[in-house]
Amino acid sequence: MAKKIGLDTVCVHIGEVKDQQFKGAVSPIYMSTSYQFTDVDVRRYPRNYNTPNQENLSKKIAALEHAEAGMIFSSGMAAISTTLLAFLKIGDHIVVQNTLYGGTSQFIQEEFPKYGIEYTFTNGYKPEDFEAAIQENTKVVYLESPSNPLLTITNIKRVSELVKSRGLISIIDNTFASPVNQNPIDFGIDIVVHSATKYLGGHSDILAGAVACSKAHMHAIWKVGANLGGNLSDFTVWMLERSIKTLVLRVKAQNKNAKALAKFLNGHPDVKNVYYPGLKSHPEYKLAKSQMRGFGGMLSFELNNGLDALTFQKELKLIKASMSLAGVESTMLSPCMTSHASMSQEQRDSIGITNELIRFSLGIESKKDLIQDIKQAIKATKKLVKIEA
Ligand SMILES: *Cc1c(COP(=O)(O)O)cnc(C)c1O
């Protein structure tokens, strides 16, 4: 049913907790950690991910991702780690995309050796890179598209088909696209994970994670999840429900701003290398268009003419030089100092993350104000370069 009703309606109405008592317009919050055990069908307990608020919001997540089942976690990393540990055990192997979110990459490299789980990072983001990394004991293939921070686009359908033909499980991190722009399950992906801290939350004020997949896969994830205890508090579940009501409005505005700013930066003499899948010059523009409804609110770029990335970001007045992404406010950061700081310079160079690279998360402000801020920051940076010279 959920698939047939409009996306905006899913955001507003699916998974509401009906207020039977007072008929209020929004979901009541059930904060109980203790529920009656006699004469009931369900043994409710927050760590079982089955309180009224948890259960209902899971339905919204499932509907958003065209999945049978959804689940909410206390962070993106709780969702990702629980999901991976549900399908990997000692002696198993996982293939992971080389341009991975830093926290996921760190989790795999630091924790998997303790459990005897082997891993291989691909050499690139193309289907043949994934194929080349598959071994006899591979169980899971894990990808991100668009990737962080260079916005590479992987052919989701071809990777899903490859994974299916080998009888493996495919997992994608759909955080950057959000379900507004991309539904990987429609292209054959088995499991979708999200950092709901980003677009689903969207206001830079809650930490949360989400998973969407088949009921059978979800049962396996749920069992591990109850053991690990990565559930989200019911109050924050309620906050997340409230946030998702405006998901489509926010992401559409962010898509629009990102496209406009990508075009502005692309033509600017003090800017080189703009990375945005919605630019016709992006190497995978056609592929992006075939699997995304919008190109997203994230882009990256490098300043030209020796202008210093850090000075530029310090000179910004409206756009914040801040960590994280996907809020209604625009932010920029240097991946080499933040999200990818744990990598060596060599590792970063090998995947194209230069010290000049700036990642830009578009908010919903007026486009002209964002452009004005960038213009004045470039001017100020140039002045400083001249003074130093
Ligand atoms: C932030 C992020 C995560 C981790 O999510 P947390 O909510 O910070 O635990 C995972 N993947 C991507 C792509 C992210 O941006």
Image (tube, grey):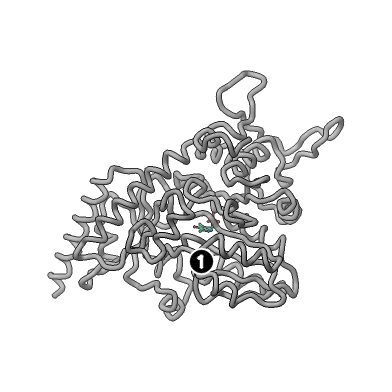
Q: Residue at x 35, y 72 (%)?
A: 355
Where, by quadrant of the figure, is residue 158 drawn?
Answer: bottom right
Indicate whether 57 appears above or below 321: above
Viewer-proximal residue among 206 and 211: 211
- Image quarter hosting the C terminus: bottom left
Q: Residue at x 51, y 39 (%)?
A: 244
Tell me residue 207's x, y (percent): 54, 49
Tell me residue 20's x, y (percent): 67, 21
Indicate whether 27 appears above or below 147: above
Q: Residue type at mark 1?
A: Gly
Q: Is residue 257 visible?
A: yes
Where, by quadrant of the figure, is residue 268 drawn?
Answer: bottom left
Viewer-proximal residue among 364 and 143: 143
Viewer-proximal residue among 105 and 299: 299
10 Å crowding of disc 1: few (<14), some (14-19), many (20+) = some
Q: Residue furthest top?
A: 22
Q: Is residue 214 left or right of residue 183?
A: right
Q: Is residue 78 visible?
A: no
Q: Is residue 246 left or right of residue 254?
A: right
Where, by quadrant of the figure, is residue 275 drawn?
Answer: bottom left
Q: Which residue in the protein does label 1 denote?
A: 102
Tell me residue 145's x, y (percent): 49, 60
Tell me residue 384's x, y (percent): 17, 66
* SS assignment at label 1: helix
- Image quarter hosting the N terminus: top right
Q: Residue at x 38, y 54 (%)?
A: 361
Q: Residue at x 59, y 65 (%)?
A: 142
Q: Residue furthest bottom?
A: 346
